[in-house]
Amino acid sequence: MLLSINDLRVKAEGKDILQGLSLNVNAGEVHAIMGPNGSGKSTLARALSGHPGYEVTEGTVTFKGQDLLAMDPEVRAREGVFMAFQYPVEIAGVNNAYFLKAALNAVRRHRGQPELDAMEFLTLVKSTMKRLEMDAAFLNRPVNEGFSGGEKKRNEIFQMAVLEPALAVLDETDSGLDIDALRVVADGVNAMRSPERATIVVTHYQRLLTYIVPDFVHVLADGRIVRSAGKELAEELEAKGYGWIEGEAARA
Amino acid sequence: MSGADMPHASESPATSLAAASPGRAERPAPIGQTTAYAAEWERTEAARAAGQPAWLRAARRQAFDRFLDLGFPGTRLEEWRFTNVAPIAESRFPLAEPAHLTAADIEPWTFADVAIRLVFVNGYYAPALSTPAASLPHGVSLGPLGPALHHLATAGDTSLARVAPVDGHAFTALNTAFLADGASLTIAPHVAIEQPIQVLFVSSPDQRATMSHPRLLVEAGADSQARIVEVYAGTPGTMYFTNAVTEVSLGEHAVVEHCRIQLESDAAFHVGVVQVEAARSSAFRAQTFALSGALLRNDITVRMAGEGVDCVLNGLYLAMAQQLVDNHTTIDHAMPHGTSLEIFKGVLGGRSRGVFNGKIIVRQDAQQTDAKQTNRALLLTDQAMIDTKPQLEIFANDVKCTHGAAIGQLDDDAIFYLRSRGLGAQEARAVLIHAFAGDLVDGVRIPGVQTRLRDILSERLTRELSRLGETAGGRA
Ligand SMILES: Nc1ncnc2c1ncn2[C@@H]1O[C@H](COP(=O)(O)OP(=O)(O)OP(=O)(O)O)[C@@H](O)[C@H]1O
Ligand SMILES: [Mg+2]
């Protein structure tokens, strides 16, 4: 098993958010996590990536057989966890190429691979950028600064494609994307699908899931997974909304 | 401050060495703190060669009298509120003796692509380390100031202390009082020097903590051009006091780029006065890098004496551990159509303290002035402190004058973002600090100097950040 989350409880600023969440993800699978606003989807993503503002009070997370929660955020990244942020941060003064090369080489060092020099790095990213229909000038712009919402999301997928993580967590990467951009992003994710990798797609709407077809769909409500099923659950949710599931969860 | 307090632009400029100074009788008894300096001054003065011209000895005495009048500035003076010079005033620094350094010793403070160089060790010209003649065009005179002064018959023959007069500033007076040597660059009208010129003042004290009073005098004739890299450095770990004065005059249409780098020993004190006078349509572009020293105080003044002067005054300072870095700048728009652009940035770690005081004067005649000042500081720890004050004194009505100040810490979200991509916590912080400071380093257009500055910045930040990592586990 690639990722195993067991009874995870997470707190932020004194507030209990995740309240006993369990989830198993095998290599090769795509899982979708859906749920109403404030149900804890981003909190799960942040907890998995080691955000210092989110305290795990109980539970375990095992990634590739190791205790993920014991690792610093950068170690998780180097081990192959990638989080595409719902709200990517703008970083003035740091250009994309510099940043991504530093990240890639940190990951490569960790894996015992030789670092890439500037030329090798450029060759690598140019082809990826082409695939994601990104303008080359983009490399010399500061990270996310002045990017439109769509550009930021595309940049997350670009980073993911370059870093080749074993587990990608996409937190509402579809929001704010027009249909063309959505297709490009989905193609980027699908290109990464392989028997060794897994993806967790957090989304509100099922549109993205027609492009990135999930193996499982989970519904998160009040910090717990209240229902899991195949891809047909996404369509059902879209048609009926979350109310019926929340109601079920409350009665349970 | 009211207009009446301001000296008007049309008043005569600074009193020169030749002008009268207050007689001895008017002077109040020296305050206690200057006694050690008085003794040292009397001793050196007596020891100095009798062959020195009488006017120079008189000028030194006059400057010393002026210093005694002024005394060391106390923290009750507005300009010195945050910088207590008691550690300097209460110490007994003998005047530094000559010391022998090799080319290898000074290598860390020289640059591959700066071939023309004057080197001073402990304030004394070091001809063996200097290369003043290398490819200088006709009409340029570059060399030690001392011998040049000895050939002059009267004080009226030199412009020394014209742009940086002794009357207003105690440390300038003290520098002039001990003046024996320094660097002098004179450029004839219409001469453009393509190669950058470095002036390096190195302190290498013996067992005692000594002082030196370096001086740099630049006279750029009309329509001349030069790039000057002025570096202050010292043997790491040593304690000393550098009291530097730089005076620059730009003739009409002259263009001078001035890069001033302080890389003093971490235990050293440095008070530096830079006075610039710019004539009509000239351009003065300065960058100052205050990178190390226990106490660094810079008083930088640019006076636009003619119309249409273009001034860029940028600075980057690093303060770590218990260091204090104080930059006081004054841009004096005395005449119309001047533009000034000033950016100062500070990175403060440890329990350091920073001071930035940026005064911009726009005098009544200085219509159509365009002045912009930005001042930013990055605090790496909760214990670091910065006092920052823009000071706009505007007496003309048709001007554009903006200023902005921002004090902040590293953005935790940005640190986390970088870490989530695999960068270590320390590397993430370093990346963000370089992003903050990088544009000022990029502004140095001499590649060797720029690269060296970048390396020094990295090296100092790495040291500070690993210390941070040890103590607090960092901020994020
Ligand atoms: N750092 C924080 N401090 C305090 N409360 C937080 C913090 N982060 C999240 N919360 C709260 O926890 C709950 C879950 O937030 P989270 O962002 O995980 O929800 P979400 O499912 O991603 O919602 P959305 O669909 O709006 O993105 C919300 O009520 C939110 O206000
Ligand atoms: Mg969310």
Image (cartoon, grey):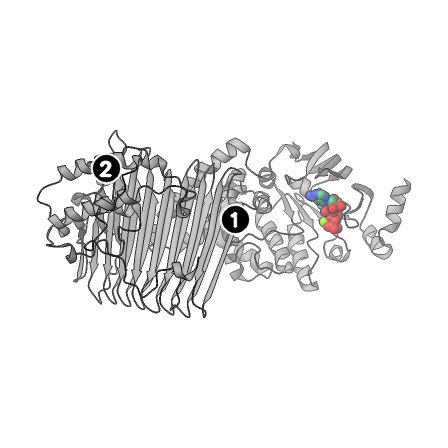
Callout 1 crowding tier (Cα within 10 Å): few <14, some 14–19, many ≥20: some
SS at circle 2: helix
Residue B133, visible in the rendered structure:
yes
Depth check: give the residue in front, A79 or B176: B176
Figure quadrant of residue B92:
top left
Q: Position of residue B298 (x, y in %)?
A: 36, 48
- Residue A189 appears left or right of B120: right
* Amino acid type, mark 1: Ile
Classify mark 1 as within 8 Å of ligand 1 or not, answering yes or no: no
Q: CA distance from mark 2 to mark 1?
A: 42 Å
User: What residue did someone put label 2 on?
Assistant: B38
Which residue is at a point 53% across and 50% down the rendered structure image? A100
Which residue is at a point 50% across and 35% down the rendered structure image? B468
Depth check: give the residue in front, B29 or A109: B29
Callout 2 crowding tier (Cα within 10 Å): few <14, some 14–19, many ≥20: some
User: What residue did someone put label 1 on?
Assistant: B407
- Residue B148 appears left or right of B427: left
SS at circle 1: strand
Figure quadrant of residue B284:
bottom left
Q: Given contact means CB atoms under 8 Å apart, are the residues at marks 2 and 1 in contact? A: no
Which residue is at a point 67% across and 49% down the rendered structure image? A193
Figure quadrant of residue B226:
bottom left
Q: Position of residue B379 (x, y in %)?
A: 50, 43
